[in-house]
Amino acid sequence: MTADSAPKLPRREVVTGAPRRVRPLPRYRPQAEIDEQTALGDAYVRSLMRGQLRAGLTAFALLATVVATLPLAFAALRDPTVVWVVLGVAAYPLLTLLAWWYVRRAERNERDFARLVKGRPLP
């Protein structure tokens, strides 16, 4: 091949001029999805509600289990003094522990939802 028969490359054009300002792309904000009540925002809110419902039903199931087994425990004890001690003393720490667990779980659900809405990753 000779220099005359070599394929010619297209000529490169050089653009000179003031660069245009480029607008940054809008950031994706889940909070806007919720505020505008879009399908995605609805999914976010439903996920929070589902988590809260799950925590509430779990706490209710544990409470119902404890309350349902109390008559069996009273029948087995048969001593009125022990029954009153169980009702007056032993039941309250269990109820307090259950309430403490429920509040912690509900607050964690809300904290995770707030992080999701603000766009921060979960730890």
Image (spheres, grey):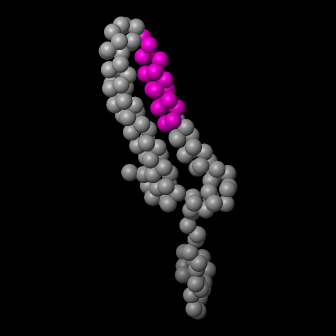
Q: Main secondary structure of the magenta part?
A: helix
Part of the protein shown in magenta: 55-72
Say which of 81 and 109 sits in front.
81
* Residue that appears at 32% across and 20% down: 85
Say which of 70 and 32 sits in front.
70
Does 115 appear above or below 19?
above
Percent x, y for residue 12?
58, 83
Is residue 5 something one can see in this rendering? no
Q: Residue furthest front?
A: 81
User: Which quadrant of the figure has residue 29?
Assistant: bottom right
Percent x, y for residue 117?
52, 57
Say which of 1 and 96 sits in front.
96
Does 2 appear above or below 33?
below
Residue 69 falls within the magenta-colored stretch: yes
Residue 2 falls within the magenta-colored stretch: no
* Residue that appears at 42% across and 11% down: 72
Residue 2 horizontal side relative to residue 67, left or right:
right
Percent x, y for residue 67?
46, 21
* Residue that appears at 34% across and 31% down: 93
Q: How many marks?
A: 0
Percent x, y for residue 51?
52, 40
Is residue 46 something one can see in this rendering? yes
Say which of 2 and 100 sits in front.
100
Does 97 appear above or below 83?
below
* Residue that appears at 59% across and 78% down: 23
User: Which quadrant of the figure has residue 87?
Assistant: top left
> What is the quadrant of the N terminus in the image?
bottom right
